[in-house]
Image: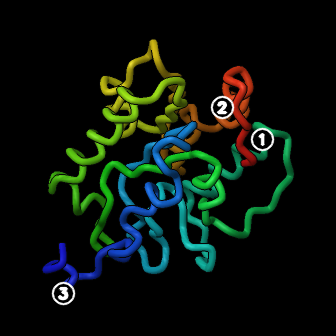
Amino acid sequence: MKQQRLTKTIYPKAKNIFNAFKFTPFYNIKVVIIGQDPYYNKNQANGLAFSVYSQCTIIPPSLKNIFKEINNDLNKNKLYSDGCLIRWAKQGILLLNTILTVEEKKPMSHANIGWEIFTNQIINIINQLRKNIIFILWGSFAKKKLPLINTKKHFILTSSHPSPLSAHRGFIGCNHFSKTNKLLLQLKKKIIVW
C-alpha cells in the first residue's frame, strides 16, 4: 500500500484507514453497518462506511438516501448539512467497509487484495465473542456476509442498497433506524440518536 501511495491517490488517508475501530471500540459495539468500499472522490472517505468528512460540501447520493430514510422513518424534518457519521460511531455503531481502501475515481479497485479476509475475520470475531449485536446489511455485497453471522445470537436487518440505483427496491421504507432503536430498548441498551 505504501508503494501504491507513491504513484497513485489512495483513499482514505493512511492515518484514517482504521477509523471504524478507533471510534467504536470492540466492547462498545451495539450495531454493525457493513459497507462496500470507501468513497473514491477527493475529501470524502474518512475511514467509516457511508461517512464523509464534515467539511465535505457534497453529500454522496447513498448518504442522502440514508438521511432521507431516517427522516421518513422517525418522522423527523432534519436538514443534514454534514455527512460525517463519527457521531454514530461514538454511540456504538461500527461502520465497517468490507474493503478499507480505494484508488481515486476507481470504485472496487482494491477488491481481492486482502481486505475482505481481514474484515471477514472482524465480523467472525464479533459474531463469536459478542451477543445481541444488530447487523445492518444493505445491498447484495453486504448480504454476502450473512453466513458469517449466527442468527440465534444476533439480529440482522437487510434491504437493498441506499444508492439511487437500488434504494427504491427496499431501502426506502425499510425503517431500519426505528427497528434498531426498538431492538436496543428490548436489550436495555441506550438507543441511537440518528
Tell which residue pokes out farthest to the top in this image: 152
The residue identified by callout 1 is 72
Residue 146 in the image, given as x and y percentages of width and height:
36, 26
Other-residue count near label 3 (Cα within 10 Å), few / some / many at <14 / 14–19 / ≥20: few
Distance between the Cα atoms at labels 2 and 1? 15 Å
In the image, what residue occupies the spot 30% across and 46% down? 119
Give the mark, 3 or 1, whose residue is nearer the N terminus: 3
Distance between the Cα atoms at labels 2 and 3? 42 Å
- For label 2, the SS is helix
Q: Amino acid at mark 3?
A: Leu
The residue identified by callout 2 is 180
Give the mark, 2 or 3, whose residue is nearer the N terminus: 3
Other-residue count near label 1 (Cα within 10 Å), few / some / many at <14 / 14–19 / ≥20: some
**In-front residue for pair 84/23:** 23
Residue 61 in the image, given as x and y percentages of width and height:
56, 59
Q: Which-is-in-front pick, marks 2 and 1?
A: 2
| Residue 177 falls left or right of residue 148 | right
Residue 58, placed above or below residue 163: below
Distance between the Cα atoms at labels 3 and 1? 45 Å
Q: Say which quarter of the image contains residue 1.
A: bottom left
Residue 165, placed above or below residue 133: below
| Residue 194 falls left or right of residue 83 | right
Give the mark, 2 or 1, whose residue is nearer the N terminus: 1
Is disc 3 in contact with disc 1, using a CB cutoff of under 8 Å? no
In the rendered view, how is the structure colored?
rainbow
Name the mark on residue 6: 3
Q: Say which quarter of the image contains residue 167.
A: top right
- For label 3, the SS is helix
